[in-house]
Image: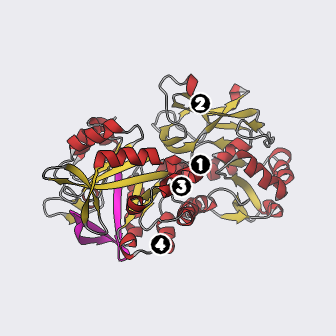
Amino acid sequence: MIPVLLIHNGGIYKTNKFQAPVYIGDPINAIRLFNDLGVDEICILDIDASKKNVPPNYKAIEDIASEAFMPLSYGGGIRTIDHATNLFQLGIEKIVLNHVVQNDTEIVNKCASQFGSQSVVVSIDYKKTLFNGNQCYDHVKRKTLKMKVSDAAAFAQSSGAGEVMINSVDRDGLMCGMDVDTIRGVSGVIDVPLVVCGGAGNIEDIQNAVHAGATAVAAGSMFVFHGKQNGVLINYPEEEQLEKYLR
Amino acid sequence: MKYEVGVINYGIGNIKSIANILQKIGANFVVITNPNEVNNCKSLILPGVGSFDAAMKRLENGDWISALHNFAKVECKPLLGICLGMQLLTIGSHEGKKNGLGFIDAETVFFDREKMVERKKVPHMSWNIVSSEKENIFFDSSKLEKFYFVHSYHVICNDQKDILTTTHYGYKFVSSFSRDNIIGVQFHPEKSHHFGYDFFIKFLKDFVS
């Protein structure tokens, strides 16, 4: 179970269907709380970097990494081997490649051969379309692409990704349950670990995703909101609860 | 002795995350880049990521080998090897041609997928459970203790008495060893949140002092 924290204007935000970011809090504070809660892994995604076409904000990432006493993955603005090298030196365990992959799969291959495929995650955003099933989505240009999510996942694996992450745009921020059909479909076409994101609202949702073939579940809202009014509260299930549902 | 612990920076490995966790638990530590500085430290941590030969070469070129030998084998002061730092304490590794430090009678080998009951991916990159194989001050066998691992090679001890913990990944392997003042851990306590804090606290409180 991996909390995903979206960085926007230097703070942590949570989106709804990839839009309308709501301010959650300061990244360092959130990381400290997640340390105390004993999370398995944290994923930090800078949702501005690719849109603004800027490299990762190393200073901010260094500050976050220095407080993260758990494995940390980072995505946003990684376009070159040098970007990736800098990130690994700051103490990041895995890099997440998303937008760049649409134009340049070579980067996946290069990163995998230099740093090992276990450190390279390819993340794919997708949307359900009326006639064509699940198609990839470009969050920078805000449009759906022709490629299907399962084809993109298989392609990511063959390009050298050691892990594939799929993210349902339609379910982002809704805590409405996970897209088990798509998870089942995608897990059938790849051998590398599959991380799924979008729609998780409680531990049963996560259990369902795991039964459908997910290796791990990433979520934003579930770990930062609490109660009917969605008050901001950093939370993570107790070890005993995880044991009961997931092991 | 000015510092409880010195973290050896020989140009390889992620020194920063180890320094961060020592800071977090309030340790009196220093990052050292010169072998002369070992005399300021009550104990040493040898980190390491990357390849065996590249790391040994760095140790040779930086004149670390005799300083480490003197510290750990002559003066018998506490030394902790982490990940590749543990493997460097062995006689040698299948990963390279160079001799290791040889402080522990053990060898470093590649994960043998043929031997695995269930074929697992290599590298082993995940949280995993450690089980104590002898009485020790670090791990509590009555509790479930998890640490974060990232490695393709693991250690085989020639003397079974050196095995501190084992872990299952396709088969049972040595996840830490100890002999007298020397300890090596294959996992990353610096990336294992409260299990890691406890580990470093025990290292400093019970092993070093």
Whether tag 4 and tag 1 are in contact, CB under 8 A, the answer is no
| Chain for numbered disc 3 | A
In the rendered image, which residue does mark 1 sit on? Answer: B202
In the rendered image, which residue does mark 4 sit on? Answer: A55
Q: Tag 2, which secondary structure?
A: strand
Whichever of labels 1 and 2 marks the residue nearer the N terminus, that label is: 2
In the image: residue B103, left or right of residue B167: right
In the rendered image, which residue does mark 3 sit on? Answer: A111
Q: Which residues are magenta?
A: A1-25
Residue B172 placed where, x, y %? 56, 27
From what the image shows, is residue B43 above or below residue B135? below
- Disc 1 to disc 2, how far (Cα)? 23 Å
Q: Residue at x 16, y 54 (%)?
A: A129
- Disc 1 to disc 3, how far (Cα)? 37 Å
- Disc 3 to disc 2, how far (Cα)? 29 Å
> Of discs 3 and 2, which sits in the foreground?
3
> Of discs 1 and 2, which sits in the foreground?
2
- Disc 4 to disc 1, how far (Cα)? 40 Å
Residue B35 placed where, x, y %? 81, 60
| Chain for numbered disc 2 | B
Whether tag 1 and tag 2 are in contact, CB under 8 A, the answer is no
> Of discs 4 and 2, which sits in the foreground?
4
Residue A77 appears in view? yes
